[in-house]
Amino acid sequence: MPEDQGIFHDLTVEENMRISIRKANEAAMTKQEWILNLFPDLKTYWHRKSGNLSGGQKQMLAIARAYVNDNELLLIDEPSKGLAPIVVENVMKSIEQMKLNTTVLLVEQNFFMASTIGDRFYIVDEGRIVHHGAMKELKEDKESRQKYLGIA
């Protein structure tokens, strides 16, 4: 899922979802229904043009479009960017649900979100991994959080 959402603003939510599905089979339709239950706003605005959605709803649509296919890996880039805290919380819960069925690679600067969702972490500086390990270790390591992330 790209950082800039990658949705088609002139298309409806339904049309955006329809063009995202690689194979329109029963499994895809079942997964789409599961996603619409996860993001009920998308069901509510199903026939509305995507350009008229709020920022959080657009982010939900972008995530839904990426997740609807049977992917083994879901790469999500900065899902909390520009969102209100309550929307970030909803997106976090949704990604945690998706993580039960798919490997999620999350690129995120919001440490709370990353540390809540992530099992492992990789800190990248100038294109190189400078620190990595179990997220639990980073959450407990104040010195490393200060050194690499600038947070105590």
Image: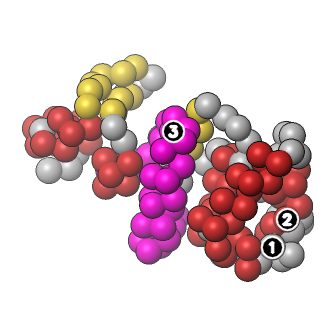
Residue type highlighted by circle 3? Val
138 left or right of 116 in image: left
Image coordinates of residue 134 in percent, x first then y, are 26, 31
Which three-letter amino acid code belongs to the residue tagged 2?
A: Glu
The mark that comes first in sequence, 2 or 3, is 2
- Locate residue 44: give its quadrant: bottom right
Q: Residue at x 64, y 53 (%)?
A: 63
Q: Is residue 96 magenta?
A: yes
Q: Position of residue 77 (x, y in %)?
A: 55, 44
Q: CA distance from mark 2 to mark 3?
A: 24 Å
| Among the 4 quarters of the image, the one containing residue 119 | top left
Q: Residue at x 87, y 55 (%)?
A: 18
Secondary element under disc 1, as helix, strand or loop, is loop
**Is 81 placed left or right of 120 in the picture?**
right
Percent x, y of residue 80: 49, 58
Give the residue number, with chain letter if any, for mark 3.
Answer: 104
On the image, numbered disc 1 is attached to which residue? 46
Amino acid type for the residue under numbered disc 1? Trp
First in sequence, mark 3 or 1: give its number. Answer: 1
Residue at 33% of width from left, 33% of height from top?
120
Q: Which residues are magenta?
A: 82-111
- Measure how far apart labels 3 and 1 are at the Cα level: 26 Å
Residue annotated with mark 2: 14
User: How many other residues sit within 10 Å of disc 2, few (<14), some (14-19) or many (≥20)?
Assistant: some
